[in-house]
Amino acid sequence: MRINVKAVAVSVLALFPLLAFAHVGNDGGTHHVLSFTKGLIHPLTGMDHLVAMILVGIWSAMNTRTWWLAPLAFAGLLLVGALTSMAGITVAATEYLVAASLLVVGVMVALRLKLSAVTGALIIGVLAIFHGLAHGAELSHSAMALSGMVMATAGLHLVGLGIGYLLALSTTNRWWAGVIGSGSSLLGIGLFSGLF
């Protein structure tokens, strides 16, 4: 499978305008930077979110030619979930559903579950809504924070895609997918049961 380096480079460069601050207030724009940074760091500070986002990339790279669809669905529906939460709509069991998502995607990776790209994206997208609900409840109501969150999510998906491609190409280390997926599922069970 060939990766279109130009398309990836253009996509990354297209995100740079998010860093531009056209309307600077008395604080010199630092409120934008702090908000963006908070959003950027937020997905990296929770093991459940961090692992889930990397797993999405791993599964996508190992199991589908349309490798971009599940990460795109995750990022998009993560944003929908965050906006829903910021609008005041919540789900009581959000943290349990986030933990359950680790179990589901962990099993998908461990078993190298073969699904169509659309089916995989639908499953992963639904799980992403719960991650978004959790993030939206914790972030400030700021477009910059949301931009940072989505950018960090994309970065974690890229890390997962890299790991997934290495696992897919390896003929001797395929067992690592089982280890990674099983470990992530155990983390999900532990979080769900309150052990962690």
Image (cartoon, rainbow, N blue to C red):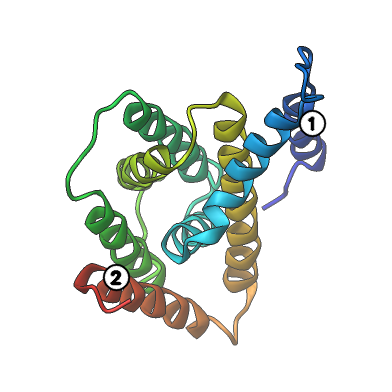
Mark 2 and mark 1 lie on one chain; the one further toward the N terminus is 1
Residue type, numbered disc 2: Leu
Q: Marks 2 and 1, how far apart in space?
A: 38 Å
Where's residue 13, x and y in %? 80, 32
Residue matched to label 1: 10
Left-right relation of 143 to 99: right
Residue type, numbered disc 1: Val
Quarter of the picture holding the C terminus:
bottom left
Q: How many marks?
A: 2
Residue 191 tag number: 2
Taking the image as drawn, is residue 38 in sight?
A: yes
Badge 2 element: helix
Residue 83 tag number: none
Location of residue 149 with respect to 161 vertically, above or below:
above
Residue density around tag 1, few if under 14, some if 14–19, many if 20 or more, within 10 Å: few
Where's residue 5, x and y in %? 80, 43
Location of residue 114 with respect to 176 vertically, above or below:
above
Where's residue 135, x and y in %? 42, 43
Farthest front residue in view: 26
Left-right relation of 155 to 22: left
Marks 2 and 1 in Cβ contact (< 8 Å): no
Left-right relation of 76 to 170: left
Where's residue 154, x and y in %? 60, 45
Quadrant in which residue 107 is drawn: bottom left
Residue at horizontal 40%, vertical 34%?
82
Residue at horizontal 68%, vertical 38%?
34
Quadrant in which residue 49 is drawn: bottom left
Taking the image as drawn, is residue 61 in sight?
A: no
